[in-house]
Amino acid sequence: MTDKRKVRKAVFPVAGLGTRFLPATKAVPKEMLTVVDKPVIQYVVDEALEAGIEHLIFVTGRSKAVIEDYFDIQVELDQTLRERNKKAEIELLEAMLPKAGTTSFTRQQAPLGLGHAVWCARDLVGNEPFALLLPDMIMKGEKGCLKGMVELYEESGGNVVAVEECAPDQAHKYGIVGVGETVGDGFRITRMVEKPAKGTAPSNFFINGRYILQPEIFPILETQERGAGNEIQLTDGMVKLAEAQPFAAYHFRGDTYDCGAKDGFILANVAFALERGDIRPIVEGPLKTLLQGLK
């Protein structure tokens, strides 16, 4: 019997050092870099809340205290805004503030991989299914990626990962899944392979950084040997879990921006700016001029 208990909690692994964005990330966590006027992590949290997530769990590291501060009241700022009668700004900050008692923070003391970061959240998750959202990945579509995954999970149970299509000759760069029978807006997964050798990939569907996992993943990760990069790899743990539980793939048909890479971060800023009615009229013309000047 597949497990269809409600997905109430989401885990955000935010302990990474962000070395690809040095020197900026020497003082500012990469998750707090802004896309237009919101930190990257806010977009990912908004996606989780849209999907019905009730409790946010952040796996942090040293120098990431600013993330915890961000999801709290800033007393001096709040007081100043009220004194100046800045109603719009007050409403904006109140809207993004999580309800009391719905955020938790735990430490990953050493950079031992994504699988280890997930394992660090075990006591906060408890014995229930949970969502996992990689905070570098910002999704944009008609429906939030995690919301679509939750809908598929409610139909299929078990475990769900989100996938997108890549060019077949690029499949060796990603975690790739094998395609089985159709299930809702996705399909059953027959295999999972991390960065397969060229020409050996079972499909061109790659895992894009969103997961719904059952708690049985935790004891697997606890005893798992280190894999690629001498780290505890989540994919290795999922392959083991798939021996006992079904996995389904949700086919996300929107746009994904990898804000852990400079090109993805820049493209995200442009895409979200052009989607804003208050910003597009200001930047569209100058952007076209810039592009024409590069010809």
Image (cartoon, rainbow, N blue to C red):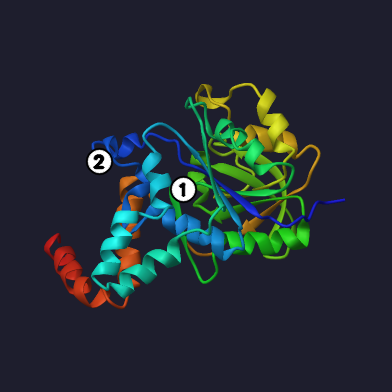
The residue sitting at 58% across, 59% down in the picture is: 146
Q: Looking at the picture, does residue 18 appear above or below residue 154? A: above
Question: Image check: 148 left or right of 4?
Answer: left
Mark 2 or 1, nearer chain start: 2
Question: Image check: 31 left or right of 130?
Answer: left
Q: Hey, which residue is sitting farthest right in the picture?
A: 1
Question: Image check: 30 left or right of 207?
Answer: left
Hey, which quadrant is residue 201 in on the image? top right
Which residue has dot 1 on it?
Answer: 135
Badge 1 crowding class, 10 Å Cα cut-off, few under 14, some 14 to 19, many 20 or more, is: many
Which of the numbered marks, if any, corresponds to residue 250?
Answer: none
Badge 2 crowding class, 10 Å Cα cut-off, few under 14, some 14 to 19, many 20 or more, is: few
Q: Nearer the viewer, residue 198 or 77?
A: 77
The residue sitting at 39% across, 47% down in the picture is: 69
Quadrant location of the C terminus in the rendered image: bottom left
Which residue has dot 2 on it?
Answer: 24
What secondary structure is marked by label 1?
A: loop
Q: Looking at the picture, does residue 275 appear above or below residue 53? A: below
What secondary structure is marked by label 2?
A: helix
Measured as percent of width and height from the top left, residue 199 is found at: 56, 39
Measured as percent of width and height from the top left, residue 94 is found at: 42, 65
Measured as percent of width and height from the top left, residue 210 is found at: 57, 51
Q: Amino acid at mark 1?
A: Pro
Q: Nearer the viewer, residue 247 or 174?
A: 247
